[in-house]
Amino acid sequence: MSENIVKLDVVMIYKDRYPLPIITNDIFMEEFENMELREDDIFVITYPKSGTHWMQEIVNLILVNGHVEKLNSSNRRIVIELADVTTFTAAALAEAGPVLRQVKDAPSPRVLSTHVPFPLLPKQLREKRCKVIYVYRHPKDAIVSYYNFSLKFAHMEYGHPILHTPQQFAHFFDAAVPGKCMFHTSFTVEYGSWFDHVLGYYQLRHDDNFFAVSYEDMKTNLREVVKRVASFIGRHLDEDALSRVVEGASFQTMKESYKKDHNQNKDKGKGVLDANMFVHKGQTSQWTEYFTAEQNETFDKLFRDKMVNCEWTVQYEPRHL
């Protein structure tokens, strides 16, 4: 690897197959797969950088009729299979347990977020028929957003900014795109490929406890998406409550909410998720600023091969740069 390229994608391999973040481990994952669920649990599931915290906020807002002041940092957790930390130092990780332990006694209904691929879902999910909300996003935009997120994490790890370069993105692209890397001898990204993730959950599309929506639909018609999500989880919103949820789920309000949580918890000597890491405007078609023509061609070929029978992703049909 060139000395000018920083390795962004350090992972742990679970069950000799699944690449997961290094802030989880075998013990945490076994607890996750065997966790005790409740029938009214609501799972928010996405591939990374596909609207996890946005949908999590929407669901939580629906549950409180849009009264954002009733939410706090306990509602805005990272995905539950990871270590319960807000600073990613070796000392903090060594002492931490998984987030899922912190939600064990949380009041119902619990909103539980995860990025795990379909085969790793908790074993009780089908039996308890928990609600599952899956958000998918244009794969090229998801990869670019994931890349920029990884640069920020690398900044924390290395102690200095990691700048975007075409070479740095090429390194990440090769890790994120199936067939571009030697799995155990080179590198890959956390949670594996977008293709496998989406197709795994596509199997659930006919289940009545499963709801899927695209990130792009959330961007273009948030009000309608909120209505559909509320109906799915069995909550009625009048027009005033609906408007409050839409406003509370706006980029600016979420930014302010996360900042308020951060300041309150900092005063108590505790950490909280940083809005700068987890809340973004989420531009669409940003990938055109990163992908080379060759990378685009490589990705498009893979997309055509893998997604030919997936109705969700028709809107992402390849186009030339």
Image (spheres, rainbow, N blue to C red):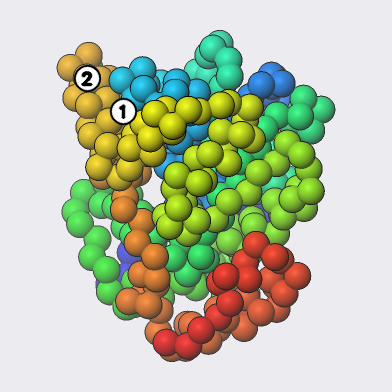
At x 74%, y 50%, the residue is 205
Q: Determine whether 156 is above or below 60 in the image.
A: below
Tag 2 and tag 1, C-beta contact below 8 Å: yes
> Is residue 71 at all visible to an observer of this figure?
yes
Which quadrant is the N terminus positioned in?
Answer: bottom left
Residue designated by label 1: 272
In this rendered view, identify the residue nearer to me: 130 or 181: 130
Q: Quadrant of residue 130?
A: top right
Q: Amino acid at mark 1?
A: Val
> Is residue 14 at all visible to an observer of this figure?
no
Q: Quadrant of residue 29?
A: top right
Disc 1: CA contacts within 10 A as few (<14), some (14-19) or many (>=20): many
User: Which element type, helix, strand or loop, lies under badge 2?
Assistant: helix
Which quadrant is the C terminus positioned in?
Answer: bottom left
At x 39%, y 65%, the residue is 284
Q: Determine whether 27 is above or below 293 in the image.
A: above
Q: Is residue 138 left or right of residue 122?
A: left
Q: Amino acid at mark 2?
A: Gln
User: Which element type, helix, strand or loop, lies under badge 1?
Assistant: loop
Disc 2: CA contacts within 10 A as few (<14), some (14-19) or many (>=20): some
- Marker disc for residue 152: none
Residue designated by label 2: 264
At x 76%, y 29%, the residue is 129
Q: Determine whether 299 is above or below 31 in the image.
A: below
Q: Is residue 133 left or right of residue 118?
A: left
At x 56%, y 72%, the residue is 316
What is the spatial separation of the Cα atoms under label 2 and label 1, in whole angstroms?
Answer: 9 Å
Q: Determine whether 99 is above or below 315 in the image.
A: above
